[in-house]
Image (cartoon, coloured by chain):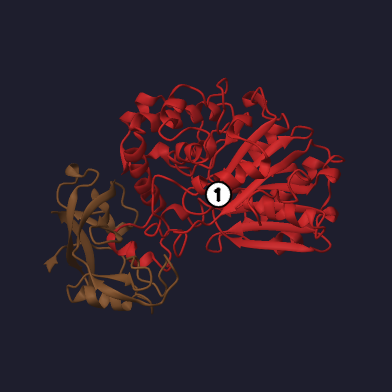
Chain colours: A red, B brown
């Protein structure tokens, strides 16, 4: 594929329904139950029934979820023509939407559910679970075994390279807490001032507790279909205008192989940038708001700079100026982010984007909601989308 | 080789890495060096990640390098680490090529970008591991 050719499914596919279960620390129900409930909610939301579903795309890590077929069984769906079970974490959600949209546009499936479900708090906690991989032998024995540590390493290098400060990190967290106060779903709704943030102890310097997402039990689902079909659904279409995935050279051997990655101050979005904007025939100036995957606070500025939304070294000033607040020039992470709402591995970053495009953001609805950037990734590989209102190009 | 009491999960070498661990246990730091593209790489693996060649060898590493990044861990992410926090981990760009990650032995308050360090091979229970100290 040449860089300039626009993938055919873009501008012709859309997301309509979104569904959530509550986010909690102990759901008390099985992951299949969470998954099916979120998928049912997404179908109800856009006015479809389980009979209409012929595709499911999902992702999980270390067997922490159920296969799409288990959801089809729970929904009583007649037959799937398309089923994808990805072994991925936070890199996946935008790519999973794209896979669903490509299948729809290719005529393989008509209505595809995309979901993520897990008991990520009461069950296996990914943030600190030790699991064997090709490179774990070089990390675990030295006491380097958890995601907060890996991303903290990147955070330090980003801070060295760009001048991003501890105080700037505090602004990322504090702004997202403002949004969380307006989001009844968020697990952490307590306001946090930058000074309070700076007074809190380190977990892994440069990270404090508030820099880390909140592990959660829960599920989210979205319904992807063609733009033509979407126009007959109960909810307005969030049109998929731009999409890109990247596994850049240096991504290494597994999800936590940071050894081979040349520049820890840049995540995959730096490499995704050109293809993403070209795919949408858009530039960073065209977006009205952004939902940025944030398993850790630092990923927000790193991604904004990587995608060229902020120039290198300018994201600290941008965020601390208030630009990303609800009344700012570019609202970012309007649900409070994964930092406040809870960690459903980034699927809830996409659902928030759709709700905002549809004008269903409630107290936290952004004023201008024609075009949105959504990202899925913290480190080496990952994906992103550009979504717009129907009729906006 | 110095004895340092660090208690963490054990090393589990695989078919592509056992030679590297074996050398380390002899107090030898080897870094895979590609004969096709002349670059060094880490971790050890079957193919050079720069060019895909299988024509590489374990070259002697000086163990000298500069701090590329570092963290200080205050929370024990595994129960056996509870007695060790806080501790620092450094990522080091070796002067002769390759990036390694290891425990930092010494006062972590001195850590800064490009701090010169040298490798320190240490023993932890049955494992021989690679760490760093100020050069």
- Picture layout, residue A1 above or below residue A308: below
x, y percent for residue A224: 75, 48
Where residue A363 appears, as percent x and y from the top left, is 64, 24
Residue A187 seen from this side: no
Mark count: 1
Chain of the residue under label 1: A
Q: Is A206 or A62 nearer to us in this picture? A: A206
> In this view of the protein, which residue sits in the foreground, A122 or A365?
A365
Image quarter where the N terminus of chain A lies is bottom right
Q: Could you say which quadrant of the image residue A258 lies in?
A: bottom left
Task: Give left or right: position of A305 versus B86.
Answer: right
- When asked about the image quadrant of residue A20, the answer is top right
Q: Residue at x 31, y 76 (%)?
A: B57
Q: Position of residue A273 (x, y in %)?
A: 55, 44
In the figure, is residue A283 to the left or right of A298? right
Residue lying furthest top: A327
Q: Secondary structure at mark 1?
A: loop
Which residue is found at the position 45% from the left and 65% from the top?
Answer: A253
Question: Is residue B89 visible in this depiction of the protein?
Answer: yes
Residue occupied by mark 1: A345
Crowding at dot 1, Cα within 10 Å, few <14 / some 14-19 / many 20+, comes out as many
Picture residue at 73% right of the left edge, 46% below the top? A10
**The C terminus of chain A appears in which quarter of the rendering?**
top right
Q: Which residue is found at the position 67% from the left and 32% from the top?
A: A371
- The image shows residue B115 at horizontal and vertical percentages of 19, 47
Q: Report the side of A169 relative to A387 (left or right).
A: left
């Amino acid at each position: 594929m040449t860089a300039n050719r626009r993938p055919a499914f873009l501008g012709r596919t859309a997301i309509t329904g979104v569904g959530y279960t509550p986010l909690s620390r102990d759901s008390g129900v099985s992951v299949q139950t969470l998954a099916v409930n979120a998928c049912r909610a997404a179908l109800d939301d856009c006015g479809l029934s389980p009979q209409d579903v012929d595709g499911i795309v999902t992702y999980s890590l270390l067997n922490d979820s159920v296969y799409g077929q288990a959801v089809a069984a729970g929904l009583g769906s007649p037959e799937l023509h398309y089923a994808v079970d990805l072994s991925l974490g936070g890199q996946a959600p935008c790519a999973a939407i794209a896979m669903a949209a490509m299948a729809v546009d290719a005529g393989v499936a008509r209505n595809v559910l995309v979901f993520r479900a897990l008991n990520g708090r009461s069950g296996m906690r990914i943030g600190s679970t030790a699991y064997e991989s090709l490179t774990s032998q070089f990390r675990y024995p030295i006491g380097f075994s958890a995601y907060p540590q890996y991303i903290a390493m990147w955070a330090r290098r980003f801070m060295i390279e760009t001048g991003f400060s501890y105080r700037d990190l505090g602004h990322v967290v504090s702004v997202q807490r403002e949004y969380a106060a307006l989001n009844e779903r968020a697990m952490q709704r307590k306001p946090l001032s930058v000074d309070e943030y700076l007074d809190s102890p380190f977990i892994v310097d440069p990270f404090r507790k508030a820099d880390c997402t909140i592990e959660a039990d829960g599920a989210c689902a979205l319904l992807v279909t063609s733009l033509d079909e979407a126009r007959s659904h109960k909810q307005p279409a969030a049109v998929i205008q731009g999409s890109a995935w990247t596994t850049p050279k240096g991504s290494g051997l597994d999800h936590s192989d940071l050894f081979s990655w040349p520049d820890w101050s840049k995540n995959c979005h730096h490499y995704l940038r050109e293809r993403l904007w070209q795919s949408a025939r858009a530039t960073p100036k065209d977006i009205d708001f952004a939902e940025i995957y944030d398993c850790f606070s630092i990923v927000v500025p790193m991604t904004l700079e990587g995608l060229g939304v902020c120039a290198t070294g300018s994201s600290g000033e941008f965020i601390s100026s208030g630009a990303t607040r609800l009344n700012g020039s570019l609202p970012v992470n309007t649900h409070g982010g994964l930092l406040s709402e809870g960690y459903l591995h980034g699927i809830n970053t996409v659902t928030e984007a759709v709700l905002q495009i549809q004008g269903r953001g409630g107290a936290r609805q952004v004023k201008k909601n024609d075009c949105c950037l959504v990202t899925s990734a913290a480190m080496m590989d990952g994906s992103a989308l550009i979504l717009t209102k129907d009729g906006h190009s | 080789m110095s004895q340092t009491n660090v208690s963490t999960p054990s090393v589990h070498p695989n078919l592509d890495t056992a030679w590297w661990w074996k050398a380390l246990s002899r107090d030898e730091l080897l870094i895979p060096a590609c004969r096709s593209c002349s670059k060094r790489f880490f971790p050890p693996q079957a193919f050079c990640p720069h060019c895909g060649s299988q024509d590489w060898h374990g070259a002697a590493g000086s163990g000298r390098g500069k701090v590329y990044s570092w963290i200080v861990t205050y929370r024990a992410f595994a129960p056996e680490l509870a007695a060790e926090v806080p501790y620092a981990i450094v990522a080091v760009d070796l002067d002769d090529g390759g990036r390694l990650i290891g425990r930092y032995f010494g006062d972590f308050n001195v850590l800064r970008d490009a701090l010169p360090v040298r490798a320190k091979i240490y023993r932890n229970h049955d494992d021989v591991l690679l760490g760093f100290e100020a050069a």
